[in-house]
Image: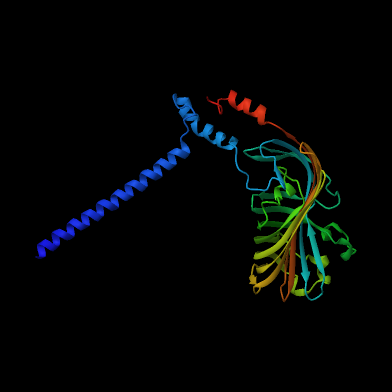
Amino acid sequence: MMKLRFHIGLLVLMFVSSNTQSQIDSLAKNLIDSVKSKLLDDDIPQKTFKDRFMYPHRWYVKQLLAPQTPYYDTNYIRSNKRKLTLTIPVVKKFYGFNFTDLSTKNTLMFSPNNYYYVGFNFSNIILTFGFYPGIKFGAKPDKGNTSGKDVQLTVVGRRVITDVNFQRYAGFYVFNRKDYDITVQNPDLVFIRPDIHVFSFGVNTMFVFNFRKYSLRGAFSFSDVQRKSAGSFMLGLYHSYMLFNSTDSSIVNTPLQPSMSPELYDINRISLITIGLSVGHGYTYVYKKIIVSAVLNLGAGGQKTNYTTLDSAGHTLSLNPTLHLNAKGSIRYDNQKFFFGFMSTYDNNYSLNPTLFNTSNYISKIMFFSGYRFNIKKNGRKLLKAMGLVDYN
C-alpha cells in the first residue's frame, strides 16, 4: 500500500513538474518573441557585416524619427525637439555666503569676483550641448581675483525639473564693505580675502503636476514653446552640502573682530549639510509672441552645522531648521524660429541656529540670450539617408 501511494505521488509530482516546466517554457518563449518584435526590424538591412554593425544605430535613429503620440496637450504646448536650435547666451553667475553674529546682529557678506561669460548652446532631437570658449568680461577691478569652477545645470523633463549646482571658488571679498568702513593701513586686508575658499554642491528636484498643459521646457529651455497661458503646482525635495573655510586665518579676521563676538574670532571652517521638502507654483503667461514665466518654490528642512577653530578642534551645533527659496523668471520673444530674451534664477538656503551664529548662502544666475531654430526635418532626413541611417526600402 505504501509503495502504491509513493508511485502515485511520484506520478503526480512529475505531472505537475511537467506542466510547470511547460508554462515556464511558454512564458520564456513569449518574452523572447516580444523582445524580438521590439528590437528586430525587417526594414533595416542585416546582410553584410557593416549592416549588422550599424543596426543598433539605425534602429535607434528610426525610433527617434518615428511618429509618436505626444504626452502633452498640443493646444497648449508645441515641441521643437526635432529642430536644431542654436543659442548664444551671455551669462553672469553669482554666489554669496553670509555669516551672522547672533549676539551683535552684525553680518559679513562674502562674494567671489565673477565675470560675464559668452557661450554657445546647441540642441536637437538627440542631445543638448553648450560650451563657453573663454570670452569673459565685467569683473570688478578693486575686488580681488577669484578662480574656480561654477556649474549650474537645469535638467527639464516631462514631469520633473532638477537643478544641479556645483561651485568651487578661491578668492572672495566682503560685499557689504560700507558696513565696516574701518580705517587701517592696508584696507585690502580687510575687504579682499584671497584666503577664503568654498566648495558647494546642491540638488533641487521638483515634480510638476499639470505637465500636460504647462511646460517648464517652454519657460526655461528652448525645446518647447508654450502656446497658451497655463500653470502648475509643484512638490519637491532638495539637498545641499557646503564647506566654507579660510586657509591662513579665521573667517572673522583681525580688523573686523571688534564688530563681532569673541566666540567667533577663531572659527576658520564651516560645513553645512541640508535636506528638506519644498512646495511651489509656476505660471507662464502668453501674449501673442511674448512669453513671460515665473516659478517660486518655498521649502523647509533640517541642517547639520559643523565648524573648526584655529586650534584644529572640531565643534558641532545641534540639528537646526532651515528655510529654502528657489525662484526662476524669464521673458522672451519667440516666433518659432527666432527668439531672444532674459532669464534669471535664484536659490537661497537660510539656517535658523538658536545660538552663536547663523549662515545663509545663495546661488544665482542672469542670462541674456538670442537664438534660432533650423528646421532639419526634411534636409535632416536626406542627410541621414545619405549616411545610410534611415529609409532602406
| Res. 329 visible in picture | no
| Residue shown at the point (58%, 25%) measured from the top left | 387
The vertical placement of 289 against 389, above or below, is below
| Res. 285 visible in picture | yes
The image quadrant of residue 317 is bottom right
Applied colour scheme: rainbow
| Residue shown at the point (56%, 27%) measured from the top left | 391
Return the residue found at the far front: 75
Nearest the eye: 287 or 129: 287
Count of marks placed on residues = 0
The image quadrant of residue 300 is bottom right
Is 331 left, or right, of 274 in this rendering? right
| Residue shown at the point (66%, 61%) measured from the top left | 235
Nearest the eye: 179 or 72: 72
Work out which quarter of the rendered image holds the N terminus and state it. Answer: bottom left
Is 49 left, or right, of 300 in this rendering? left
| Residue shown at the point (50%, 34%) measured from the top left | 56
Is 366 left, or right, of 201 in this rendering? right
Instruction: Give how far across and how far down residue 238 sits, in percent.
Output: 65, 61
Instruction: Give how far across and how far down residue 137 sits, in percent.
Output: 82, 43
The vertical placement of 317 against 28, above or below, is below
Instruction: Give how far across and how far down residue 41 sits, in percent.
Output: 48, 33
Instruction: Give how far across and how far down residue 148 sits, in percent.
Output: 71, 49
